[in-house]
Amino acid sequence: MPNGKQLTAQIREMPVIPNSLPLWGLGQMGLIVKGPDALAAIDPYLSDSIREMTQEQFGGLMSRAFPPPLLPDELAADVYLITHEHPDHLDGPTLAAARPDARFVAPGWCMEALTGLGIRRERITVPEVLTPFTLPGTSLRLTAVPAAHYDKEYDARKGYRWLGYLIEWNGVVLYHAGDTVLYPGYMETMRDLPTPDVALLPVNGRDYFRESVLNITGTLLPAEAALLARELGWGVIIPGHNDLFTANSIPNAQIVDALERLAPRQAFKLLQPGELYYFVK
C-alpha cells in the first residue's frame, strides 16, 4: 500500500481519459473517484474515531484493521458524498480537515453533525431522492437512491435517512449503495435507473451476535449481493464494508463462493485500501 504522500501524488497526477473513472479504495465503504473536472470522496473514514468512542465498552475491538491510506488533510477532495450519519461513513476528523471550499452532499439527517464540524449550510446539499442533478462546477450527474439500514426511514423534514448514490460521470455509471439491505421496491427502483458499470456494495452480512452484542446494523448477505447483480445485469461488483473492523467482517472466501455459485459470470474486484482500480468502459 502506498503511503499518504505517494497516494496523494498518484491521485493528483492520474490522467482521466474519456469513458473512464479512476477509483481508489479507502477501506470500509470509502472511495475516491476522479473525474475530468473534480475529485469526489464517498464516505471516507480516515481516523480511528470509532475505537475512541467504543474503547470503554469494547476495548480495542473496534480498532482499525489497517492504517488509513492517507491522512484527512491529504484528501483534497472537491466534493464529499456522505450516505448516512454513522461515524464510519460520516467521520468527523476526516471531514473537519476538508478544504474550506469543498462541497458536501448528504441526507438531511447529517446536517447537525456536519454543521457541528464548522461546515456552513450553504456548502451542504441535501438531495431529493431519484431526482438527478449535476453538481455545480462539474459534469458529475448524481442521483440519490433510498437505502434501508434496516428500515427505509423517512422524516418529513429531514427526508430519507439512508442513501446510496448513482453517479454518471465521464461516460461511466458508478453506483455506491451506502449501507443497505434489500427492501420492497428496491429491485424495481434500480431497474428504472441507468445500469451501473461499477457497483460498490456492502456485503459483510448480518447475524445475531453483531446485532445484539455489538449493536451493529448489518448489510447485504453475500448471496443477496450476488443475486442482485445477476438479476439486474450490473457490471463490475466491488465488495465493501468488510475490511475495516475484524469484529464486523466475514472471510472474503464467503463472498467469492457466493459469486461463483450464484453469479459465476459476474465480474468483481476485491479492492484493497489505497489500491487504484482504473475502470475503462
Image (cartoon, rainbow, N blue to C red):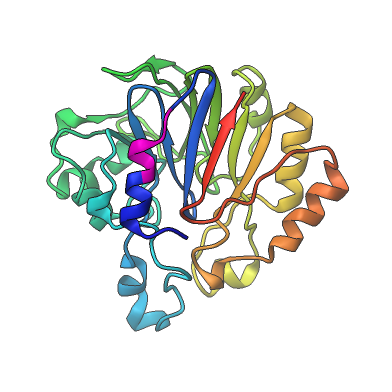
Asked if 251 appears above or below 83 in the picture, the reply is: below
Q: Position of residue 39 (x, y in %)?
A: 34, 33
Choose top left, top right, bottom left or bottom right for residue 108.
top left
Choose top left, top right, bottom left or bottom right for residue 12.
top left
Region of the chain picked out in magenta, as a range? 10-15
Residue at the image point whose x is 81% and y is 56% from the top: 257
**Which of 10/229 is in front?**
10
Asked if 159 appears above or below 29 in the picture, the reply is: above
Residue at the image point whose x is 50% and y is 68% from the top: 245
Q: Where is residue 235 in the image (x, y as percent from the top left)?
A: 69, 30
Q: Is residue 203 left or right of residue 48?
A: right
Q: Based on the picture, tell me whether residue 13 belongs to the magenta stretch.
A: yes
Q: Is residue 100 left or right of residue 54?
A: left
Magenta stretch, main secondary structure class: helix
Q: Based on the picture, tell me whether residue 81 belongs to the magenta stretch.
A: no
Residue 82 shows up from this direction: no
Q: Position of residue 281 (x, y in %)?
A: 62, 23
Q: Where is residue 131 in the image (x, y as percent from the top left)?
A: 44, 16
Residue 205 shows up from this direction: yes
